Amino acid sequence: DAKTTQPNSMESNEEEPVHLPCNHSTISGTDYIHWYRQLPSQGPEYVIHGLTSNVNNRMASLAIAEDRKSSTLILHRATLRDAAVYYCIRFNYGQNFVFGPGTRLSVLP
Amino acid sequence: ETGVTQSPTHLIKTRGQQVTLRCSSQSGHNTVSWYQQALGQGPQFIFQHYTEDENRRGNWPPRFSGLQFPNYSSELNVNALELDDSALYLCASSPWRVSSYNEQFFGPGTRLTVL
């Protein structure tokens, strides 16, 4: 049970922003939202995580809805290297990390 | 800083055999988790070791077992291999118990094929 819902695939043009949605309608008050991505032929890599407030780092931004039932990972300028499967994970300390099938992002030149 | 490494890269076994997969964590990381990733799916959590003890496990049969050593190396052992065990096996390390805050660092995986 992945506990999150994401679109199977999305497309973006290079150098344009990408908004990857995630639904986690049954989230509890102490669950964090983590995003990982998996480039072809590699293991997953951490992207960003947050609890309630929007978060920014060098890779991306995470926008969390006020009711916390959904979130959006924002890549500000997609590059070809950003083509990957993006996983949205609802996680709390003491639980197992549960990956869903993720969203496969294609970036068109 | 050396990342997480895994060996071998690829492995072919036959049904019924046993296999040992190895992982070397980043220095200072005392938590290692193992995942199985079938083709086209997300990684599935197998178990986690913290300071050499298994402290968390997913819904996997006992033929999946593991060890963690003090030198930041770990093993995943699978006995009585079945065809469905064919998958990419990933290990991930983190500096302490996977918490709501910490990121996991994944290795590139070992591709196991069971014939």
Image (spheres, rainbow, N blue to C red):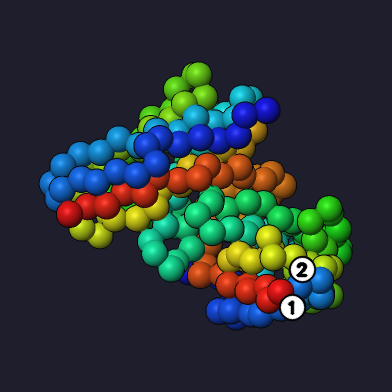
Residue farthest along the front direction in this orientation: A109
Which chain is mark 2 on?
A
- Give A28 or A77, whichever is nearer the viewer: A77
Which residue is pictured at 44% across the width and 66% down the height?
B41
Amino acid on which the number 1 mark rests in the picture: Asn
Local secondary structure at mark 1? strand
Local secondary structure at mark 2? loop
Q: Mark 1 points at which residue?
A: A13
Which residue is pictured at 66% across the width and 70% down the height?
A27
Which chain is mark 1 on?
A
- Give B13 or A69, whichever is nearer the viewer: B13
- Tell me where residue B14 appears, x and y as whole percent: 15, 48
Amino acid on which the number 2 mark rests in the picture: Ala
Task: Say above or below: B71 vs A108.
Answer: above
Please tell me how crowded label 1 is: few (under 14), some (14-19), or many (20+) other residues with Cα within 10 Å. Answer: some
The answer to whether mark 1 and mark 2 are in CB contact below 8 A is yes
Q: Earlier in the sequence, mark 1 or mark 2?
A: 1
Q: Name the residue under label 2.
A: A78
Task: Describe residue B46's horizontal placement relative to residue B71 as left or right.
Answer: left
Tell me the quadrant of the picture where the C terminus of chain A can be found.
Answer: bottom right
- Tell me where residue B44 appears, x and y as whole percent: 44, 57
- Tell me where residue B62 appears, x and y as whole percent: 26, 44
Numbered label tally? 2
Which residue is pictured at 66% across the width and 80% down the height?
A11
- Give B28 or A43, whichever is nearer the viewer: A43
Task: Say above or below: A109 vs B11.
Answer: below
